[in-house]
Image: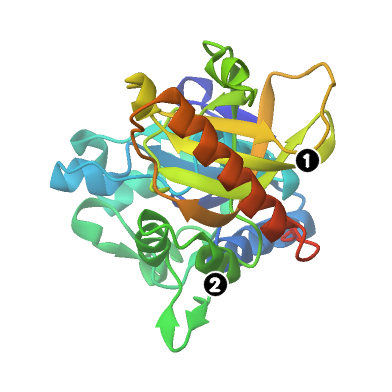
Amino acid sequence: MKAISPKDLPLEEKTACSIGNFDGFHEGHIRVLKTLKNEATKRNLKTVVISFNPHPREVFTGEPLCRITNLETKKEFLKRLGIDYFLVIPFSKDFANKTPDEFIEFLKEDLNCKLVVVGEEWRFGKDKKGDINYLRQFIEVIPVKKVLLNSDKLGSSLLRKLLRGGRIDEVNKLINRTYCLKGKIIRGKGLGKKLGFPTINIDPVEKLCLKYGVYAGFIEINNKIFKSAINFGIRPTFEGKNLLIEVHIIENFKEEINQDFAKVYFIKYIREEKKFDSVEALKEQISKDIKTIEEILNEKEYKLNNFS
């Protein structure tokens, strides 16, 4: 899978396209992307997934919108699904003002798009005036039915609400896999090691919906999976300000880390992040957290990502 930007356009290869932010990679998203891949293969087309940054809602409302899935995780999932190109378009009011005809021209001329696969309610162009029926006059379109959950549409808004509430186990049931984040490993200040709980530190980059706090989970590193205590937050006891994913492997881990990125899986929310009165109080709480996390992770075998 190759990540591209508008400067890489136009594409010479004939393509099948899907447009959306795919934030969360829930079953509705997976259904669209698998259909895209299957139908493109039948027609000997390359696949292109088109997303926007910032999220269009942020541009229209002026309000920041947290992310369910960061960019690195999105790239990983698209690669696993066999997508050829991932195009991120800088979204602006100028782009939003493209008429339906201008957007169709963009698809045809810049992306050489011969097929569009989208959700059945997808609309496009200024004021969302374009729809699937209009697009069909110019490009072949395959609409994909939405996924229903208790008669309600499964969508990113529900997942954002659950993540903000720390209801990670409910999120995992809805997306039918284990919620995970991939990010770049960064060198920390060695605070965990000084406390007796060394951590692998990961930069999430984007503002995420995930609630600050301690989680039971796993880390995938050196092509292996390890049980872990995870802290997502800013480390208030040490007056931290930068958001960080800190992972303490609770198994015997003495390996050299030979990669730049790691993937973290979140199983259960344990407690809120808080500022402790002393380092000793923090150490005592971490020991309690690890005991709780070991009990949770030893209860059963956990199936991690299973959508591909």
* SS category of the residue bearing label 1: strand
Q: Is residue 144 above or below residue 69?
A: below
Residue 216 pos. (x, y %): 61, 50
Q: Amino acid at mark 2?
A: Val
SS class, disc 2: strand
Q: Residue at x 59, y 53 (%)?
A: 179
The correct choice, above or below, for 206 with respect to 43 in the image is above
Q: Quadrant of the C terminus?
A: bottom right
Q: Residues within 10 Å of mark 1 (few under 14, many from 20)?
A: some
Number of the front mark, 2 or 1: 1
Quadrant assignment for the N terminus: top right
Amino acid on which disc 1 is placed? Phe
The answer to whether residue 47 shows anywhere in this view is no
Decide if residue 135 is in sight here.
Answer: yes
Can you give x and y, in whole percent of width and height, for residue 85 in the image? 63, 37
Q: Nearer the viewer, residue 130 or 295?
A: 295
Question: What is the distance, in whole Å, between disc 2 and disc 1 at their CAs?
Answer: 37 Å
Q: Residue furthest bottom?
A: 151
Q: Is residue 74 above or below residue 27?
A: above
Q: Is residue 265 left or right of residue 227?
A: left
